[in-house]
Amino acid sequence: MTVNVNYRTSTDDSRIKAANGGLLRPLSVVVGRKETWSPARVTRASWSVLTNMGAAFHILQLFRVKVFKDFLHTNPRFLFKCLIRDYLAQGLTVAESMACFLHHYRSLHAHLPSRLLYRTFSSTITLHEGKQNDTPYSITFCFSRDFEKEGELSLNLLVDRAPVFVLSFTIVPGWVVRSQAVDVLLISRLQGVHGYFNQIRRVTRALHDVGPAALLLAALHGFAATLGIGEFAAVSATRQSSYTEELSGLYIGAYDDFFSGLGLVINDAGFFLSPIPHQDKPLSSIKQGHKLRTREKRAFKRQIAQAVCHVLQQEIAADAAEPLLKRLPNQIPPAFES
């Protein structure tokens, strides 16, 4: 399966050349601000822009949308996130990375009102709060900042207001992960925050023995329901952006073991694929004495998914009823074809 991101006609040449100039100018701003990018990274980014002219044109079209353009003014590196090595997953080509970046922000612009996008970029949105057995917890939603190559959006589990677990994801075109679906939520980061083992253990016990990873996956199902997305993918251990041989055991436990435990299988591209919601094991396969507990856990996860979906739908409805910002016409071109 191939993707053509360098397609152009003679009538497009002047626009594409302008697009490349438009992308190289903000790259010079990154250099001028002495950002943390190394000279090698800047060189790679420049070369990627010059060798993917069609994609460069589409990126500039994307950033004509006001909410993205405003964010770019204070975050010029944002425009080049997809050119970072191992963006989202190890082994993606530059063309695939660019396609994922564009598909994600096209999808957000198509489904979420401007005010909600501004809030997502600038702050953290609480999707669910609760308290079980004297353990206060919450699930929040935000733009991923600290780990810029491991997913565009993050769902966070907080215990006593401290973030203890993170699930990061991106809306990608299905062909990148070898799926037939048009839109797929790609999970590229799923891990606990260092130093909070006791809080993770405490909240797991409090929430019907539903672990943080399963809890945030349920929240992701709620996000998917809001946008009408019916499939998720997850990186395998060796395709996770930060995977190293020295820490292979940790990555295998966090990714391969977790998703295999859900009954998912790695495809030939190194991704786990699943419908949303994923298919639980039949109760007939659960040992006697554990079925009631299993029902409780599944009911709780459905409750979380529904709560997240309800909050996001309320946010969207509120913006539609009383818009803070006038949405621009959709100027984003169609997704790349596989």
Image (cartoon, rainbow, N blue to C red):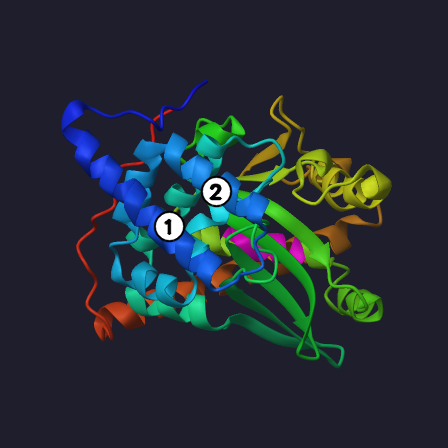
Label 1, label 2: how far apart the Cα atoms are: 20 Å
Which sits in the foreground, 11 or 120?
Answer: 11
Label 2 environment density (alpha carbons within 10 Å; few <14, some 14–19, many ≥20): many
Q: Earlier in the sequence, mark 1 or mark 2?
A: 2
Q: Return the residue nearer the eye: 240 or 310.
A: 240
- For the record, the magenta segment spans 214-221
Viewer-nearest residue: 59 or 173: 59
Q: Is residue 219 inside the magenta stretch?
A: yes
Could you say where residue 31 lies in the image, as x and y percent from the top left? 47, 57
Residue topped by disc 1: 105
Residue 334 percent across, percent down from the top left: 27, 37
Tell me if residue 173 comes above or below residue 171 in the rendering: above
Residue count near mark 1 (Cα–Cα under 10 Å), binned few <14, some 14–19, many ≥20: some
Three-letter amino acid code of the residue under disc 2:
Ala
Q: Could you say where residue 11 lies in the image, as x and y percent from the top left?
A: 14, 28
Q: Disc 1 on helix, strand or loop?
A: helix
Amino acid type at image mark 1: Tyr
* For discs 1 and 2, the disc positioned in front in the rendered view: 2
Task: Residue at 56% x, 48% y: name it.
Answer: 39
Q: Quadrant of residue 317?
A: bottom left
| Residue 203 tag number | none
Q: Is residue 201 above or below residue 254?
A: below
Q: In the image, which disc is placed on residue 45? A: 2
Image-based side of 284 in relation to 104, left or right: right
Q: Is residue 163 magenta?
A: no
| In the foreground, 101 or 138 | 101
Left or right of 236 on screen, residue 28: left
> Looking at the rendering, which quadrant does residue 283 occupy?
top right
Q: Residue furthest left?
A: 11
Predominant secondary structure in magenta?
A: helix
Count of number-bearing discs: 2
Which quarter shows the C terminus? top left
